[in-house]
Image (spheres, rainbow, N blue to C red):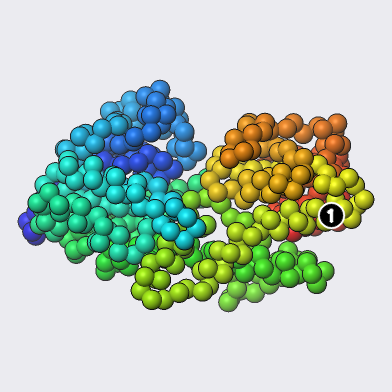
Amino acid sequence: MESNIRGFKDLIRKKQARIAVVGLGYVGLPLAVEFAKKNFPVLGLEVDKDRLEHIKNRVSYISDVPTRELKAVLRSGKFRASGEFSALKEADVIIICVPTPLKRKYLPDISYIKQAVYGISKNLKKGALVVLESTTYPGTTEEVIKPILESRGFRCGTDFYLAFSPERIDPGNEKYPVNKIPKVMGGITPGATELTAAVYGNIIEKVVPVTSARVAEVVKLLENTFRLINIAMIDELAMMAHKMKIDIWEVIDAAKTKPFGFMPFYPGPGVGGHCIPKDPLYLYWKAKHHGFKPRFIKLASDIITRMPEYVTERVADLINAASRSRPGRVLVVGVTYKKDIKDLRKSPALDMIDSFQKKGVKTAYHDPLIPYLKWNHIDLKSSKLNKRGLAKFDCVVIASEHSNIDYDFLLRNSKLIFDTRNVYKGKKNRKVVSL
């Protein structure tokens, strides 16, 4: 095995190792392009026909991958895409980056991982390294992936290597692109850890090996559970501060002047994206199978899930207090889950619009990144921001603070603004009510 590892590392060092990335979404495509930029031969495997069509037309569909970079690696011949698992037969390294949603609130769905691994198992080259990046519960790599890959006669640690290395992509973060974020990895065997570190060391500035795949799996869950719990705490404190007529934003600004022992988190209308609303619940589910119920995780999830409804109730009360027609008319500004990112995954703004509509509130939205919105029974086009249009709304709710929105214009021409993102920080105006 030692000679095999030395030979494999030599292949990696010479950039002759053929790398395959399964799943070309917001994690997989940046990863594939980064390896191709470092002159590795890269195959991207993707079953979504729309994504394959974009790649065929040399047009990026991921904000963190500029179209010019995609064109460059396609033109160089270092990157190609396929929709067939049979294309994996010559791959030396296979990295899995597929979605891991929830079937229900507390029930993980690893069906995409299983489908990918079944496809890989039929085409796995002897001696290859398989790395899972998709966030999942502790034990998935060893308890689920390893048996599937061994079902065709191969043995882990002898005929193939297996590791887990959690994705840490932060969409739209220009300060920390994929190559600047330290990479954690843990193998089923020490050799798998060593090889995984050798592979990622070519594109990532710092690699962080840990003792096992299970440890690596929990690392990602800890990171997002930390964020979930702290965001939920400050959301609850914001609701408390409102009852006490205290400005929670001023409290946070003062508290963060302490140079130790405090890290600022900020309230909002809820959390979205692929990670924070879901990942901690994978840990919650697995812990329950070991006879332990993590109360913090459930409480935090319940608080954050409640935030969109809390916002709609506050807005309804404000409209009623202003003696305007109830249920009224509301404009939601910014519907993506994150500032300046064209991404609607689990966006709290969608739940807010849904809640407003169920209350009979006539609801519209404005978002320069989302020209139309179709989600469940919501079917709307983005409204233009103009004086005449804004005059029709009883309240404007700022749900996401995109940089290219004229907030001064919004303030001058709106009757009332409910600001969930503190964009009017420091501006004392009777029209503005903060979360």
Q: Quadrant of the N terminus?
A: bottom left
Q: Residue furthest top?
A: 57
**As drawn, is 425 to the left or to the right of 340?**
right
Classify residue 86 by image quadrant: top left
Classify residue 261 by image quadrant: bottom right
Residue 92 visible, this orientation: no
Q: Disc 1 marks which amino acid?
A: Leu
What residue lies at 26% left-to-right and 41% top-to-bottom?
Answer: 20
Q: Relative to 73, say whether 360 is above or below.
A: below
**As drawn, is 258 to the left or to the right of 75?**
right
Which residue is under mark 1? 318
Q: Residue furthest right?
A: 323
Q: Quadrant of the C terminus?
A: bottom right
**As drawn, is 309 to the left or to the right of 26?**
right
Give the total number of marks visible in the rendering: 1
For label 1, the SS is: helix
Nearest the eye: 3 or 46: 46
Residue 360: x, y in percent?
Answer: 76, 44
Residue 387: x, y in percent?
Answer: 85, 33
Residue 73: x, y in percent?
Answer: 34, 31
Residue 257: x, y in percent?
Answer: 67, 71
What residue lies at 71% left-to-right and 44% top-to-bottom?
Answer: 357
Residue 274 visible, this orientation: yes
Callout 1 crowding tier (Cα within 10 Å): few <14, some 14–19, many ≥20? some
What residue lies at 26% left-to-right and 32% top-to-bottom?
Answer: 84
Q: Relative to 18, say whether 222 is above or below.
A: below
What residue lies at 90% left-to-right and 47% top-to-bottom?
Answer: 324
Nearest the eye: 356 or 8: 356
Nearest the eye: 266 or 324: 324
